[in-house]
Image (tube, grey):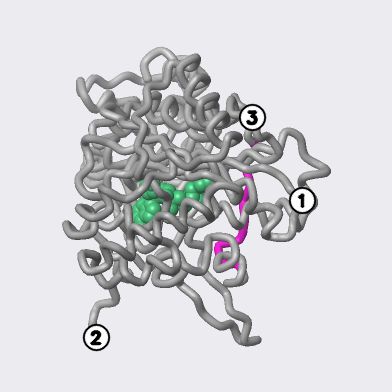
Amino acid sequence: MSEIKAPKGTRDIFAPEVHKWQYLEAAIHAYYRKFLYQEIRTPIFEHSELFSRGIGSETEVVQKEMYTFRDKADRSLTLRPENTASVVRAAIENNLFEIMAPLRFYYIGPMFRYDKPQKGRYRQFQQFGIEVFADDSPQVDAEVIFAAVDFLKKVGIVQLQLDLNSVGCPQCRPAYLQLLRQAAHAEEKRLCPDCQRKIAGNPLRIFDCKQPGCADASRAFPLIGDHLCGECRDHFAAVREALSWMNVPFHLEPRLVRGLDYYTKTAFEVTSGQLGAQNALLGGGRYNSLIRELGGPDMAGIGFAAGMERIILHLERLAAPQPRILFVAYQDPQWLAHAVQLAQALREEGYPVAVDYQGRNLKKQFKKADRLAAAFTLVLAEDEVRSGTVSVKDMASQEQSKIPLKDLNAWLKKNY
Ligand code: HAM
């Protein structure tokens, strides 16, 4: 029979790498609580319409990358490609705008995009992210950006670059897009077929194209930064000022456009000098129209999401914590019940404990203890059981001591 493999673009995570995931997840929970974020868990699949309306029907994610299927009742459902639209949907549906304060959410979970898999890019990947609703102050933008960059630094990631831009708002962007379309039409012949199609739909995405002709042509295109309305200009200036209060260095990137259509005003990305082509660790920005567009109140929003596989790649040097294992061995199967009970008592005390239920003789059990790199092996034999003791062998020094069971805890506290 042929072997069944994991689907392309997915991966299994197991020890020792899984220790890094546990470390990262614990760090996320601890860090974001300091800013009053509360965890939110939304479904893995949603009605497809949420993403076509929320992310934008012209985006690559919606056009090419969604895992969409029909269920048995012929509903169109989609595995979530991102979580911002879902968090907004959940807030509207559960009326969280009324019942929660502050409106600050964080999440950790798998997302799905039919992307071309390569190092750091998967079809099922894990994101963590934060979203803040109902606050349009530029200082919140700066705080969200700070909480993105500072977290990455705290988990030990170096060589970070923060790219920052403002992508305007429904007041100033339409007129700018007209100018951009005109400029793109004038250079249409130099653009790749994909970018030629973007002129009518979303010409901003031409800035993202890596084709040399498109990159060359777009260098002369008008920039949104020169066409912002007064409100967007003031907001962006205040964001930059607040970032300087918070000591967050940034790089102004006037061609930064995000792959999702809901952004207004501030947009940002954090990249790492240590990653190859897939160097974006996180991205985010403001989305002041999304909540209203999805049927909620007219309310501002801002957030970011980070690719956790890419962060894990940076944690390569992080030593996985090695649990110190206790191995309980028994000289004869008649002492197995005692061994099981001793193991239970030790686990209650918090120690990781192994027993070999199949252990036919002590030698084989010691071999197993060695394979598990046990710190101590505790042996129960007739003598020990009768006298209420246990022989404890330090596997590193090979020293053995006989300890009364009633003193074992205190002994372990000193020697473990
Ligand atoms: P995004 O830029 O599409 O934004 O994704 C955020 C991050 O997810 C990327 O910077 C990258 O690290 C990671 N990522 C994206 N696609 C893949 C993939 N195929 N494999 C591995 N990692 C990937 C969003 O998703 C927005 N929801 C962020 C946001 C939140 N904006 C406002 N709030």
Q: Residue 27: give x, y in percent of width and height.
A: 47, 31
- Can you identify the residue that label 3 sits on? 137
Q: Nearer the viewer, residue 333 or 397?
A: 397
Q: Is residue 144 above or below residue 55?
A: above
Q: Nearer the viewer, residue 333 or 373?
A: 373
Q: Residue 282: give x, y in percent of width and height.
A: 40, 42
Residue 285 painted magenta? no
Residue at x-position 25% and y-position 44%: 368
Element under label 2?
Answer: loop
Q: Residue 302: give x, y in percent of width and height.
A: 58, 41
Q: Is residue 59 above or below residue 387?
A: below
Few, some or many C-alpha atoms within 10 Å of disc 2 (few <14, some 14-19, many ≥20)? few
If the image is split into quadrants, where does the N terminus sit? bottom left
Element under label 3?
Answer: loop
Q: Earlier in the sequence, mark 3 or mark 1?
A: 3
Q: Which mark is residue 1?
A: 2
Q: Earlier in the sequence, mark 2 or mark 1?
A: 2
Front label number (2 vs 3): 3
Q: Nearer the viewer, residue 116 or 322?
A: 116
Spatial CA span between label 2 and label 1? 56 Å
- Can you identify the residue that label 1 sits on? 297
Tell me the quarter of the picture where residue 133 sits. top right
Q: Which residues are magenta?
A: 38-46
Q: Nearer the viewer, residue 215 or 33?
A: 215
Tell me the quarter of the picture where residue 234 sits. top right
Question: Under 8 Å from ligand 1: the CB of mark 1?
Answer: no
